[in-house]
Image (spheres, rainbow, N blue to C red):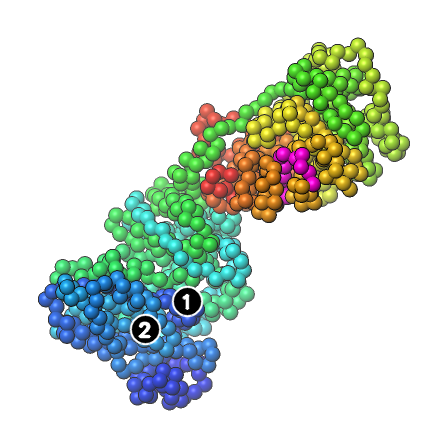
């Protein structure tokens, strides 16, 4: 006997030596070895994974034998079929460490006869029987129930020897043999293997070209780099409205793949999309009778699609169909070899998503067959791709698509899978629609009806714009609670009445120097009450303020003073001489003089003079403060916040922040951190008390400072909060944290002792515009819901496209809390502040859309099912 399939490359042995080696491995006589073939790449992959996870890639079919069926004749028919079709007599072994071979023996599967009243118990045991390397990959069993006389045929096979086409042929052929009808010989499997060995070089060249430059993002990301995914859960649904055919010669499979490519591009923010598809392997193979070959010709290959948002749906479909048609002769390449073809192959084969599409068929639907297919007991799952995180199987039928999604629950949960399935259906409907062929890919609607419903619900409460001056709101506390504490500082306390008095007197003094609307006044102090006295005095004049730490290097101060065209600066006596070195400053006022605290005829309870100080032409759209950040280049970047913006956010803060007139708020933030504006302004607007430790106590003994000041509300970054314990600060009732990633341990450490809250907000959006007020351990990494702003998630590469709900995207803020932009930097403004996008009108009803500014944060986030 000669080896029909050439060559076995790694087995440097003659056929006789191979037979001897295999016989010893299988513990059979050499004479029973009929032939030896190399395995296909998919066969090798399946058997390797079965070795890791016994039972994987096995399936059993259960058939009830009809009453008039002769058991002996039935068994004889299947024995004859095994004799005629060598795949039923095939085992797979591994030699020389790596290469796997399929060995054809000259005898078929052994029958097992079982008498039991519990067929389900038998099937449970059948699932546990091994079917791996060196073992039979086909089993026949007859199971009978004595009491009912029911008989069942259980056919168990490994997918390394059978595919979906083959099983139908086997059943039809067994039926013919039972009725003594002729079954023609099918094309032998070795012809298929030889053909693909002949085109190996051409196949490699095709995939080299196809994968050149490939740099796809993986969907979905695994929990760890070495994580071994396993699809352990399923979700099924019926896509009833899915069309059966596409227009212009485009196949429905192409439309489904294209739809997934669009969705995956949104989820990964990558135009380079790769996912796996199983193909029959029988198309464009020049072997006569290939369609009737009983063999596992199926293969898995990557589909690579470049999603260009500016081409039409029609062009995208045509490109994808051309690609898949050209690919068909070269599908038997194997993922392992693809990883070795060129540097791009490895990344292109790391996909975690498989999309299988086939016509829905029913096993033995005819009434005149000898068996009845027991679909309820048969293992429905084909089981081909358990080793991927996500497997989508679409069965095309006359009434739509039957979709089964198998997924790894450690990678994605069921609610995410359901949402993705709804989004996919939404895209399929459009891609297959006649009117959408001329639509650009960027304009394909990806939001499902559920997405729209959720977005509308999450954004039902829209931001409210407050057109008021901040000092006007603070003044309500001067009138209502003049004796209440406003400032408790290491260098002295102030009631709200005293606070009003001293700031009005200083404001009146500043107007003598021309300070008023249009001025930007830098405030250079160390940590003390005088920073906030100066702040409110400047606000009362109608000017804007800038917080600066007096210890800043002169070079940075000079840069900031130049940007704001500073003509006057308020500072301390200590810093006066240092600032005098800056020749650009016309007037330096040492504002920390006790003389400002002396009583005079200024009423503490009237705001009449404050209105006169500001002037009649002022509006709430005037600048309240400028907050400087370092910027990407290191050059200070000034963010402009208006009275209206901060008044709007302060109103939104009231509920979720939990700050009211009884609160004692710690002033901890550095003046270079915009949280210092929040700590001061929100506290005074609420009528609360700002507690100010000295620089030394803040830096060296924060716990003692908090206790001495009796502060019980503090805003700290997670890093700083880790320096304290609840026992250190028993007075603290509320911890608001943000500015950094918050871990589960941060939450669990504090939440048992204080009211733990999470805050988020860019400087451009009035410091804090999102709050999670009631934090649980599982909320680590969550920023909460918008306060004064609506939170939207867009495609990170193009904010004109809303991201699908559940996808990672760029956070976009919309609302009155957003500032005017950047001081004197129109180019930077154009990149981060933008006009209202078209998608807003698709999500919200017209009456809920206001002309609010839009800010692109650059932060990547993901929306949870709660809307947070």
Left or right, residue 141 beside residue 751: left
Alpha-carbon neighbours of circle 1 within 10 Å: few (<14), some, or many (≥20)? few
Q: Which mark is residue 53?
A: 1
Instruction: Measuring from the top left, give residue 310's x and y in whole percent.
Output: 48, 45
Closer to viewer: mark 1 or mark 2: 1
- Image spot of residue 454 (x, y percent): 43, 36
Determine whether 75 is above or below 604 in the image. Answer: below
Span of residues in magenta: 728-743
Q: Is residue 858 above or below residue 342?
A: above
Cα separation, mark 1 vs mark 2, equals 15 Å
Q: Is residue 299 magenta?
A: no
Q: Nearer the viewer, residue 494 or 769?
A: 494
The earlier-in-sequence mark between 1 and 2 is 1
Farthest left residue in view: 68
Q: Are marks 1 and 2 in contact (CB under 8 Å)?
A: no
As helix, strand or loop, the secondary structure at mark 1 comes to: loop
Residue 678 seen: yes
Q: Which residue is mark 2?
A: 137
Q: Residue at x 26, y 66 (%)?
A: 122
Closer to us: 705 or 469:
705
> What residue appears at the point 18 percent right and 63 percent down from the top-left corner?
64
Q: Position of 320 compared to 138: left or right?
A: right
């Amino acid at each position: 006997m000669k080896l029909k399939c050439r060559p076995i490359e790694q087995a440097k042995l003659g056929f006789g030596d191979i037979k001897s080696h295999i016989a010893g491995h299988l513990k059979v006589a050499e004479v029973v070895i009929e032939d030896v073939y190399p395995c296909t790449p998919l066969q090798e992959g399946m058997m390797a994974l079965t070795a890791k996870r016994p039972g994987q890639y096995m399936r059993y079919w259960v058939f009830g034998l009809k009453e008039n069926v002769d058991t002996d004749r039935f068994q004889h028919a299947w024995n004859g079929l095994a004799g005629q079709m060598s795949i039923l007599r095939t085992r797979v072994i591994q030699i020389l460490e790596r290469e796997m071979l399929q060995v054809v023996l000259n005898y078929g599967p052994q029958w097992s006869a079982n008498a039991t009243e519990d067929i389900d118990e038998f099937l449970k045991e059948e699932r546990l029987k091994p079917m791996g390397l060196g073992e039979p990959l086909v089993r026949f069993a007859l199971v009978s129930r004595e009491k009912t006389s029911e008989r069942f045929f259980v056919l168990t096979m490994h997918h390394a020897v059978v595919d979906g086409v083959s099983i139908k042929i086997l059943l039809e052929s067994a039926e013919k043999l039972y009725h003594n009808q002729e079954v023609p010989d099918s094309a032998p499997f070795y012809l298929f293997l030889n053909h693909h060995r002949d085109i190996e070089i051409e196949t490699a060249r095709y995939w080299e070209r196809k994968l050149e430059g490939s740099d796809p993002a993986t969907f979905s990301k695994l929990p760890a780099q070495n994580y071994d995914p396993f699809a352990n859960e399923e979700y099924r649904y019926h896509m009833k409205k899915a069309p059966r055919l596409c227009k212009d010669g485009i196949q429905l499979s192409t439309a489904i793949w294209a739809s997934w490519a669009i969705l995956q591009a949104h989820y990964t923010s990558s135009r380079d999309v790769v996912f796996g598809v199983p193909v029959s392997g029988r198309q464009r193979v020049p072997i006569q009778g290939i369609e009737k070959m009983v063999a596992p010709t199926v293969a898995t290959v990557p589909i690579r699609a470049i999603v260009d948002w500016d081409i039409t749906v029609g062009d995208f479909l045509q490109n994808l169909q051309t690609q898949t048609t050209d690919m068909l002769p070269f599908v038997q390449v194997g993922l392992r070899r693809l990883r070795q073809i060129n540097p791009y192959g490895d990344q292109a084969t790391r996909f975690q998503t498989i999309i299988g599409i086939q016509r829905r068929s029913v096993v033995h639907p005819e009434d005149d067959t000898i068996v009845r297919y027991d679909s309820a007991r048969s293992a429905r799952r084909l089981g081909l791709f358990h080793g991927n995180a996500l497997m989508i199987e679409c069965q095309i039928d006359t009434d739509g698509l039957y979709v089964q999604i198998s997924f790894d629950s450690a990678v994605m949960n069921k609610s995410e899978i359901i949402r993705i399935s709804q989004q996919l259906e939404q895209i399929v409907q459009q891609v297959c629609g006649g009117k959408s062929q001329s639509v650009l890919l960027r304009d394909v609607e990806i939001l499902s009806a559920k997405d729209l419903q959720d977005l509308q619900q999450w954004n039902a409460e829209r931001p409210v714009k407050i057109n008021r001056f901040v000092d006007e709101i603070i003044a309500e506390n001067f009138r209502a609670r003049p004796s209440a504490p406003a400032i408790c500082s290491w260098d002295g306390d102030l009631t709200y009445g005293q606070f009003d008095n001293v700031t009005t007197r200083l404001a009146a003094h500043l107007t003598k120097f021309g300070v008023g609307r249009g001025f930007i006044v830098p405030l250079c102090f160390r940590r003390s009450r005088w920073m906030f006295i100066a702040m409110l005095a400047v606000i009362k004049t109608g000017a804007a303020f800038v917080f600066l730490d007096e210890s800043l290097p002169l070079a940075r101060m000079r840069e900031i003073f130049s940007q704001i065209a500073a003509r006057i600066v308020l500072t301390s006596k200590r810093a006066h001489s240092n600032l005098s070195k800056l020749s650009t400053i016309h007037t330096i006022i040492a504002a920390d003089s006790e003389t400002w605290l002396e009583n005079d005829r200024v009423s503490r309870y009237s705001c009449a003079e404050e209105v006169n100080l500001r002037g009649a032409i002022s509006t709430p759209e005037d600048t309240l403060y400028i907050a400087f950040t370092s910027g990407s280049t290191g050059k200070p970047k000034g963010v402009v916040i208006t009275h209206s913006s901060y008044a709007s956010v302060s109103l939104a803060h009231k509920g979720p922040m939990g700050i009211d007139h009884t609160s004692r708020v710690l002033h901890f933030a550095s003046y270079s951190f915009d949280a210092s504006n929040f700590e001061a302004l929100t506290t005074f607007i609420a009528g609360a008390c700002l507690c100010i430790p000295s620089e030394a106590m803040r830096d060296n003994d924060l716990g003692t400072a908090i206790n001495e000041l009796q502060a019980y509300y503090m805003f700290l970054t997670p890093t700083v909060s880790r320096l304290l314990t609840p026992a250190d600060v028993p007075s603290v009732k509320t911890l608001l944290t943000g500015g950094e990633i918050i871990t589960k341990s941060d939450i669990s450490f504090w939440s048992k002792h204080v009211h733990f809250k999470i805050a988020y907000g860019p400087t451009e959006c009035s410091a804090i515009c999102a709050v999670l007020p009631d934090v649980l351990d599982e909320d680590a990494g969550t920023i909460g819901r918008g306060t004064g702003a609506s939170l939207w998630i867009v495609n990170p590469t193009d904010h004109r496209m809303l991201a699908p709900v559940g996808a990672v995207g760029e956070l976009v803020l919309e609302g009155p809390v957003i500032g005017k932009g950047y001081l004197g930097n129109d180019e930077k403004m154009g990149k981060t502040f933008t006009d209202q996008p078209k998608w807003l009108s698709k999500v919200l009803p017209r009456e809920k859309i206001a002309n609010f500014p839009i800010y692109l944060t650059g932060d990547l986030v993901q929306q949870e099912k709660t809307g947070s």
